[in-house]
Image (cartoon, rainbow, N blue to C red):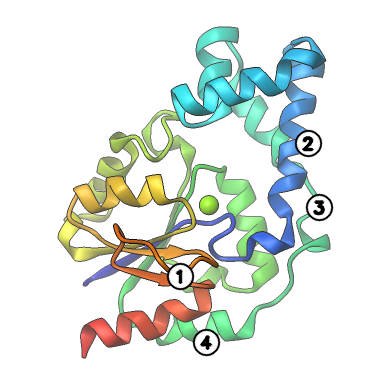
Amino acid sequence: MKAILFDLDNTLYGADRALFNLIDVRINHYMHHVIGINKDHVDTLRQRYWQHYGVTLQGLIREHDADPEDYLNYVHDIDVPSRLSENKPLRNMLKNLPQRKFVFTNGSLCHAHRVLNCLKIEDCFEDIFDIRVSDYIPKPHRSPYDAVLTATGLTGEECVMVEDCIENLHTASALGMKTILVSDQEIHHDVDAVVRCAEEVGGVIQDWMA
Ligand SMILES: [Mg+2]
């Protein structure tokens, strides 16, 4: 175990902070006001893009010729400090882990910087990989994982991945990574460990290293 890859949203902070709801509203706005999709069709389209492409952005690029950079700036333009603040236990846990640590997110770099800054954990990570790492192709597709491994010089077997989305852990597992799911449901059969919040990851890693 040389490195730990952390997802960002709903992983490094809890889903109860409802930060993603703010992005959700911005995505709907973008589809209606910028792309010009009828309001009544937005929800159905988003669902289809999610199932088909993994993120709304891929659907908008392929089917509406959307500008990905414009989209990323627009949807992540939210008031992060209104929902997140310093998390000292998380910071201490990260600082005490000897492994290399990275953020690997389907969001944007700018959003990741804001989130990490509010939690005061930005200096705990060696690097951040965002949706741009593999030309806007998101997790759980394999190509962004391959891009992260190439960029870091790591193999799948050397990594642990921490995520709230089980599909994203399936790809990680197929690449030989150990998997930790952040979830409030305790029983999951196809991951290596389940934690209720990111602060508990340190304990799991220590157990594995012992
Ligand atoms: Mg997430």
Residue at 46% x, 51% y: name it.
Answer: 165
Q: CA–CA distance between discs 3 and 2?
A: 12 Å
Q: CA–CA distance between discs 3 and 1?
A: 32 Å
Q: Is residue 41 left or right of residue 195?
A: right
Quarter location, residue 1 = bottom left
Mark 2 = which residue?
Answer: 25
Mark 3 crowdedness (10 Å alpha carbons): few <14, some 14-19, many ≥20: few
Give the number of callouts: 4
Q: Is residue 161 above or below residue 186?
A: above
Residue 92, numbered label:
4
- Report x, y in % for residue 191: 31, 61
- Report x, y in % for residue 187: 41, 67
- Report x, y in % for residue 147: 29, 41
Q: Amino acid at mark 2?
A: Val
Residue 79, numbered label:
3
Mark 1 = which residue?
Answer: 186
